[in-house]
Image: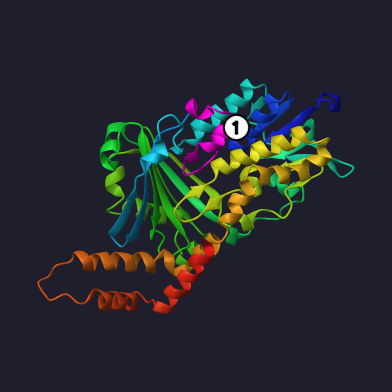
Amino acid sequence: MSEEAQFDAIIIGGGPAGAACAYTLAKAGKEVLVIERADTPGAKNVTGGRLYTYALEILEEGLSQEAALERKVTHEQIMMLSGDRSISVDYHNPAFNTAGQPPMSYTVLRAVFDEWLAGKAEEMGAMLVCGIMVDDLIEQDGKIVGVLAGEDEMYADIVIAADGVNSFMAQKAGLIADIKQETVGVGVKEVIELPADTIQQRFNIKEGEGAARMLLGCTEGIHGGGFLYTNKDSISLGAVFMPEGLADKKKSVHEMFQELKMHPSIYPLIEGGETVEYAAHLVSEAGFRGIPQKLYRDGFLMIGDAAGFVINTGYSIRGIDLAILSGIAAARAVIGAENAAAAGARYVTELENIKLLPIMKAVDGYFDLLETPFIYDKVPNLAIDVFDSLFTVHGDVPEKMSKNIMKLIKTNGLSIWQFIKLGIKGVRSI
């Protein structure tokens, strides 16, 4: 391809960020090339599997009504595990799914959703090529002007990296260094097929409805947690562990995950199912603090996971919606800028306008809260011990509840002072 036959934009990665960016650019009449290294968009992507629909509505009003989605989330659940015991909290709010407007969120399967969204970008006029690995960036006079894939050179006014966590393209552009182990977790996920009516019966949900469950206390004290999402005909079950903690435990991710699957409160939900997908992935855990100091240089932008746009508050995980927002913001910056050199600064402005950066900054304090080691084992143990004492009847005169709780706090190796400090940290976090 000659330099004269260049594109307005080349996007590396066909996930939600890249596809949303391509959709917006192509809709504005830009010549866009999306390069995806997998055989189809989503084939190599791993996410727990939840999308907040507001992002699709910003991309195009009404788009969530035709999207390739699974079940609308009607039950928000938190489960604490300790040994073979568990506590579950199930929150239901009909207002999340008010008639006449899109449900607040859906579960998704990335292989299905990503291919659909990339297809919508193609409908707008974007060119999508799959099975191609971008090897390097082409730089001229300090500006990124294209990409190199094998022996093929492709040129564009701007190159946009949407190649995920630990973006190789962002590293080659000199915007990020090698990823630090304390900033990412190792996520593993299985998709387990089950009949739709079995899923509905086991989770006490209606047809088309779904549950999103966060799991705490399933990592043997390692910083991390689990998740479970109900799809139309399958369940997405996964867990995230910090690498350093796994090394200290001398256990593999697979071993830890198998133990989670066999837990008495988890196994009955997946019993009889067939595993149809197993994948692992690095997950950004640093939130707002994990965003690179600079998201652009002349001729180059970073979006989605490549830019660290992921939120983990402990009770919810957000990534796909933020990826879509970042893709839209990048496209708006390119469309509105006088030239490629001006697109970078405008991109940061657009991230503010679309509220992505303010959203991440608002929950930045959760990072400190989640850095508290004992919330991953001692807190779930204590909570379950308290419930155990509430529901245990043995014929003896029960102790005063306050005295019993104090005894259980001590038994679990905790102190009131630790809870006071945790409370202060929690207040500061929110």
The amino acid type found where label 1 is placed reads Leu
- From the top left corner, tell me how far across and down residue 349 is, in percent: 72, 45
The chief SS type of the magenta part is loop
Observer able to see residue 211:
yes
Query: Compared with residue 344, is residue 414 higher up or lower down, i.e. above or below?
Result: below
Location of mark 1 (residue): 59
Residue 119 placement: quadrant = top right
- From the top left corner, tell me how far across and down residue 137 is, in percent: 77, 40
Observer able to see residue 147:
no
User: For this rendering, which residue is in front, 234 or 17?
Assistant: 17
Q: Which residues are magenta?
A: 38-67
Query: Compared with residue 378, is residue 132 higher up or lower down, i.e. above or below?
Result: above
Quadrant where the N terminus is found in the figure: top right
Residue 48 lies in magenta, yes or no? yes
Residue 24 placement: quadrant = top right
Label 1 CA crowd tier, 10 Å (few <14, some 14–19, many 20+)? some
Q: Residue at x 66, y 48 (%)?
A: 307
- From the top left corner, tell me how far across and down residue 427 is, in percent: 49, 66
Q: Is residue 364 left or right of residue 102?
A: right
Find numbered disc 1 in the image and state the secondary structure of the residue it sits on. Answer: helix
